[in-house]
Image (spheres, coloured by chain):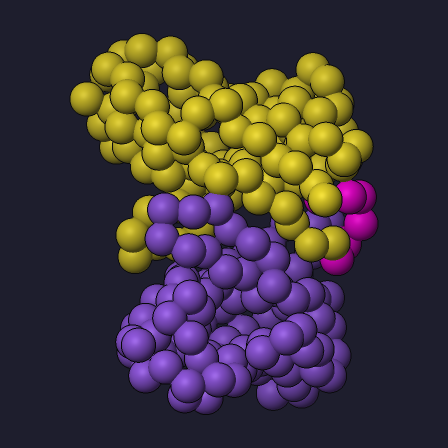
Amino acid sequence: DVKVTQSSRYLVKRTGEKVFLECVQDMDHENMFWYRQDPGLGLRLIYFSYDVKMKEKGDIPEGYSVSREKKERFSLILESASTNQTSMYLCASTLRGRTQPQHFGDGTRLSIL
Amino acid sequence: KNEVEQSPQNLTAQEGEFITINCSYSVGISALHWLQQHPGGGIVSLFMLSSGKKKHGRLIATINIQEKHSSLHITASHPRDSAVYICAVNTGANSKLTFGKGITLSVRP
């Protein structure tokens, strides 16, 4: 089974801090995704990566950056955390190809105080 | 208007009932996904389909490409089926998904 592991289930940070969310997958997937999930808004794509060192902006990239130095690891960075970034963050991965099932991590519930 | 619409928004059922959750989309797709998320939990992929019908245990997913509509059926529902059910579609040349907002299902014992 594919395992997508997010570094923290719950995280509390302060406004202005630089925050790192880590995601690791163990199935050699090419594609990796970062989403945020908010009540009433559903899942929204922040960034995705289709290969090492490659990235593409999603629907809501403002205030975020990403890093993919190794195939198995995809990091989401909040450059200067703000309260409106309090949310559930989910990482996912898939094999290369147009139609592949996405495998999700358990999510990180991030609170910015 | 969202590209992916789900109905109803919230659904309550009695244990044992047959449940149908609907998804409509307004764009051309290469595949449609049904996902499940239990309270406080991660998301699990239930089905990925581009035509016809798929069955897994008590769950059945159907899709009508011409009508741009899919349904997820749950037979003999159980309280452990209580979850958010999310419909998502592949629309582009890569594996990015466009998501519906999800439907919260509660199955009462």
Q: Is residue B108 above or below residue A80?
A: below
Residue B82 appears in view? yes
Front residue of B10/B76: it is: B76
Magenta stretch bounds: A94-99
Residue at the (29%, 76%) spot, across then down: B108
Chain A colour is yellow
In reply to whether residue A98 is colored magenta, the answer given is: yes
Residue B90 sits in quarter: bottom right
Front residue of B61/B27: it is: B61
Most common secondary structure along the magenta stretch = loop
x and y percent of residue B66 in the render? 67, 87
Q: Is residue B81 above or below residue A40?
A: below
In reply to whether residue B5 is colored magenta, the answer given is: no
x and y percent of residue A105 in the render? 54, 39
Residue at the (45%, 37%) spot, across then down: A107
Residue at the (65%, 23%) spot, across then down: A73
Front residue of A34/B46: it is: B46
